[in-house]
Image (cartoon, rainbow, N blue to C red):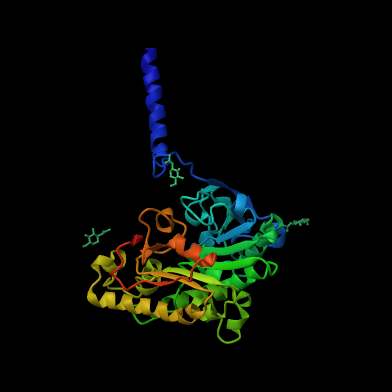
Amino acid sequence: MKAVWVVRLLVLLLVRWVPGYDCLVGVNGTATQPLLVDLTLIRNATEKGAVCLDGTPGAYHLNRGSGSGENNWLVELEGGGWCNDIRTCVFRKTTPHGSSNYMEKQIEFTGILSNKPEENPDFYNWNRARILYCDGASFAGEGYNEAAGLYFRGQRIFQAAMEDLMSKGMQSANQALLTGCSAGGLASILHCDEFQALFPGNTEVKCLADAGLFLDATDVAGGHTLRSFYEGVVTLQGVAKNLPRTCTAKMDATSCFFPQNLLSNIQTPTFLLNAAYDVWQIQESLATKEADPKGYWQACKFNYSKCNDDQIKFLQGFRNQMLDATKEFSNLKQNGLFINSCFAHCQSERQDTWYGDNSPTIQDKGIAKSVGDWYFDRAEVKEIDCPYPCDKTCHNLVPR
Ligand SMILES: *[C@@H]1O[C@H](CO)[C@@H](O)[C@H](O)[C@H]1NC(C)=O
Ligand SMILES: *[C@@H]1O[C@H](CO)[C@@H](O)[C@H](O)[C@H]1NC(C)=O
Ligand SMILES: *[C@@H]1O[C@H](CO)[C@@H](O)[C@H](O)[C@H]1NC(C)=O
């Protein structure tokens, strides 16, 4: 009888242990621990009004650096779309993107946030912080809607998070990098020079925008889906006053929420990492249900190998617009680019795209190496891929 119980216990232990163990085994069989990082509420967030849509304090995850990276800081702004009207912002109040009550107490740091040299060769021992996104306007709004109980405090969250990190040692950083992907990629463009201005002149400050090149493009129906959407975000959330003055002095605020109108005015060295066929933009701004009521793009937008010649031509046009939007930016020696011809959205946070055995490359050079070469001035990096379907190294990540 006892033996049966021992066996049962062993089976139970194995069943509980084996699935977890599977992902703890590294590439060469050595056990690697996933890095789990605790949630921290921004210090004095409530008194500073640095609150999420529902009024709860903003938050971040921080893993401290060590050794040669002890005084270097990487700050990542989390992404997660935007909310452009009362209904969609109220919806967020019961999600992690609108309330710190719903945020994960611990998250895993991977890719550019990893603490392992074999996963993140250049930044693994830096201080690495991920500022959580709970305002819905790329950390740039300022306002309050009493009727709906909505706080639009993205700009204050950004500022209070920076003040908190400064007090935790970032003020004496030797090197710093502001990054982010998607709405966070846009945020890292919007806040780049402001981030740089927080530091004394001897700190080397740069910015990396991953999948942040949202284009003011024409959708498949000839309309401007994303422009109308951004107009809602900017108006509802009081974003105009926080946009770079160099842009708002010349054009309307909605235009100044588009990177293409900001890039040539950024003073701080910046790197743009983007898939030329950004799948978020294809699905949510170019071939939306509204722009494609007959579903002509349905198969193509969820599986690029089902696109017909006309559709590929349209997508090549989109890629050309992206390249045009970065031309002037690219001429500046201090800037870097990696625009690969893949169907993806965000490639720096995922381990498989950031740095691994068969990660995406352009001319044999992967993303982590390209970003590191640019950051540390080891080489100039202006990598523009040949157009689809030439690149065989893509990790095409098309959400359904
Ligand atoms: C496993 O790989 C890592 C990184 O490639 C290396 O540092 C480590 O020494 C390897 N371990 C063994 C046991 O081969
Ligand atoms: C938080 O508030 C306290 C008391 O007002 C102040 O001493 C401290 O410097 C503040 N910390 C930050 C990070 O703003
Ligand atoms: C995409 O379409 C191709 C060709 O029709 C098919 O072979 C492939 O399995 C599809 N991929 C997915 C993820 O559905």
Q: Is residue 132 visible?
A: yes
Q: Ligand 2 shows up in which quadrant of the image?
A: bottom right
Q: Residue at x 55, y 51 (%)?
A: 103
- From the viewer's side, name the closer residue of 365 and 327: 365
Quadrant showing the C terminus: bottom left
How far across and how far down the image is residue 269, in percent?
56, 72
Picture layout, residue 6 above or below residue 180: above
Q: Residue at x 44, y 39 (%)?
A: 31
- From the viewer's side, name the closer residue of 346 and 359: 359
Picture layout, residue 321 above or below residue 188: below
- From the viewer's side, name the closer residue of 136 and 69: 69
How far across and how far down the image is residue 145, in percent?
62, 68
Q: Is residue 144 visible?
A: no
How far across and how far down the image is residue 235, in percent?
56, 76
Left or right of 286: which side holds 117?
A: right
Q: Residue at x 58, y 51 (%)?
A: 101
How far across and how far down the image is residue 264, in percent?
53, 80
